[in-house]
């Protein structure tokens, strides 16, 4: 019985132990810590363009943003500092289906009084939790439904355009603001 | 705590290394013993080898069920001797395991079945029935997973707040299949009663994943890894041999030469 392949079988079974060592060495790698390189919940990326020349980006001088919670209170955005730039990233509130931000043009504080021109923007979206990995759990993916500027007497933003609806990473611009 | 967790796989690895060394020494020393036997022996020695059905249970799973709060499991095993070295073997079991990470709590629960062959590498002295087992298995599992909790991973959650979902969600009808290499020992403690230890290396062939989730633990297969389809396991088992018939093992010079030829 099984005579003709007896030799091969015996050889194979004896060498299984070698295979063990090799594969164990390969298999030993940690994946219980969420790596910083993993794309998790992404922020909203807004880029500023020139209203005179729609193709070109235009820097906003002294740009600064604060978040406004559903009760109307201002919240500081972590990592947000005053600087002149043509791009801003804003974290969206995953527990609500919209987030509000106050964006200042030429922000400064003189004698405890805030100077600059604030415009309030509202982003409406739907939120979907998407599985990432055992260590990172889930991330939120936002689908932008609407983007609006609250009207006031002195708006520095003139027009807006949603360029990418799905907020999955921070390498692309989701909303364009013309000023 | 973190250090201990890291130590565990390392310990497993070291133990398997030890077994490997132990076993190779055995194999080599065996062939030497054969060489040393005087070639003048002409008489044949006849001894009856026991053939039959061996069945038993996994002690390690019983132990873990008793001492680990997030684990319960049970496994019965059986093998049937086909030839001098070859056995057909199989395991049937149940496992329930809760996996907890910083961002996720989930438990898997289900049954599994493994079938394959065991090959005895050990050339016993006459009248002894010990085994150094090298085995191959094909395993299948049918299970369900329940996601108890998750936290949305958001590096910018300081602005708003961290979002946690405590809604329990069950994903049922999940399946997985894998192949498995086994390496271990079985020693006859008393007449027909065996105590064994083995380590298992598994490679997943297929699995049915839940929607928007993954199989963190597969009953019978063990925990999964992000980057590979490899799994590991071990077992301490106790088994009883029910002898069905006896077959003569003839130890004569011809056989020895045959074996030497096979051993190369």
Image (cartoon, coloured by chain):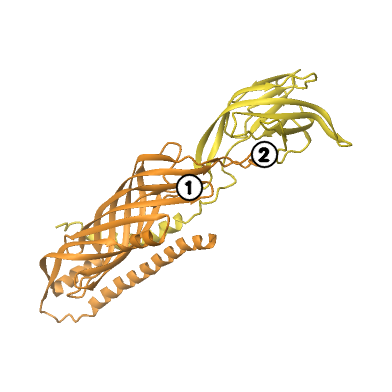
Chain colours: A yellow, B orange
- Look at the numbered disc 2 and give the secondary structure of its residue: loop
Q: Nearer the viewer, residue B84 or A169?
A: A169
Q: Residue furthest right?
A: A111
For disc 2, the marked residue is B159
- Whole-Å distance between the Cαs marked 1 and 2? 25 Å
- Look at the numbered disc 1 and give the secondary structure of its residue: strand
Q: Quadrant of residue A120?
A: top right
| Image location (x, y in percent) of residue A78 | 70, 41
What's the residue at 11%, 79% (across, down)?
A: B42
Q: Is residue A175 above or below residue B30?
A: above
Q: Chain of mark 2?
A: B
Q: Is residue B252 above or below residue B92?
A: below
What's the residue at 45%, 61% (across, down)?
A: B9
Crowd tier of the residue under label 1, counting other residues whose Cα lies within 10 Å: few below 14, some 14–19, many 20 or above = many
Q: Quadrant of the N terminus of chain A?
A: bottom left
| Image location (x, y in percent) of residue B182 | 31, 59
Q: What number is the disc on residue A32?
A: none
Q: Nearer the viewer, residue A163 or A91?
A: A91
What's the residue at 38%, 60% (across, down)?
A: B64
For disc 1, the marked residue is B105
Q: Quadrant of the C terminus of chain A?
A: top right
Q: Quadrant of residue B32?
A: bottom left
Q: Is residue B105 visible?
A: yes
């Amino acid at each position: 019985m099984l005579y003709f392949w007896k030799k091969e079988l015996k050889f194979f079974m004896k060498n299984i132990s070698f295979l063990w060592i090799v594969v164990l060495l390969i298999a030993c790698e940690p994946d219980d810590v969420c790596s910083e390189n993993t794309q998790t919940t992404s922020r909203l990326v807004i880029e500023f363009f020139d209203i005179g020349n729609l193709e070109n980006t235009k820097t906003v001088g002294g740009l600064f943003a604060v978040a406004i919670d559903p009760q109307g209170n201002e919240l500081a955005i972590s990592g947000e500092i005053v600087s002149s730039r043509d791009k801003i990233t804003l974290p969206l509130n995953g527990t609500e289906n919209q987030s509000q931000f106050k964006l200042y043009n030429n922000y400064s504080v003189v004698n405890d009084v805030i100077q600059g021109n604030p415009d309030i923007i509202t982003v409406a979206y739907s939120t979907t939790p998407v599985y990432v990995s055992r260590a990172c759990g889930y991330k939120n993916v936002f689908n932008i439904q609407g983007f609006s500027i609250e009207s006031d007497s002195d708006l520095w933003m003139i027009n807006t355009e949603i360029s990418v609806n799905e907020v999955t990473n921070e390498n692309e611009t989701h909303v364009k603001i013309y000023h | 705590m973190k250090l201990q967790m890291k130590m565990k796989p390392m310990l497993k690895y070291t133990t398997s290394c030890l077994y490997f060394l132990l076993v190779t020494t055995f194999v080599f020393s065996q062939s030497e013993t054969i060489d040393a036997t005087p070639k003048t022996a002409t008489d044949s020695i006849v001894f009856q080898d026991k053939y039959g059905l061996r069945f038993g249970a996994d002690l390690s799973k019983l132990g873990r069920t008793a001492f680990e709060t997030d684990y319960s499991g049970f496994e019965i095993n059986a093998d049937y001797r086909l030839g001098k070295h070859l056995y057909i073997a199989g395991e049937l079991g149940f496992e329930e395991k809760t996996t907890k990470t910083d961002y996720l709590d989930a438990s898997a629960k289900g049954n599994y079945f493994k079938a394959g062959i065991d090959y005895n590498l050990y050339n016993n002295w006459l009248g002894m029935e010990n085994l150094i087992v090298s085995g191959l298995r094909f395993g299948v599992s049918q299970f369900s997973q329940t996601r108890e909790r998750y936290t949305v991973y958001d590096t910018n959650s300081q602005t708003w707040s961290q979002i946690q979902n405590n809604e329990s969600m069950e994903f049922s009808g999940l399946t997985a299949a894998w192949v498995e290499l086994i390496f271990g020992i079985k020693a006859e403690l008393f007449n027909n009663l065996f105590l064994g230890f083995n380590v298992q290396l598994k490679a997943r062939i297929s699995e049915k994943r839940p929607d928007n989730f993954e199989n963190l633990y597969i009953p019978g297969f063990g925990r999964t890894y992000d980057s590979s389809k490899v799994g590991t396991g071990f077992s301490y088992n106790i088994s009883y041999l029910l002898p069905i018939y006896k077959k003569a093992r003839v130890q004569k010079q011809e056989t020895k030469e045959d074996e030497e030829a096979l051993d190369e």
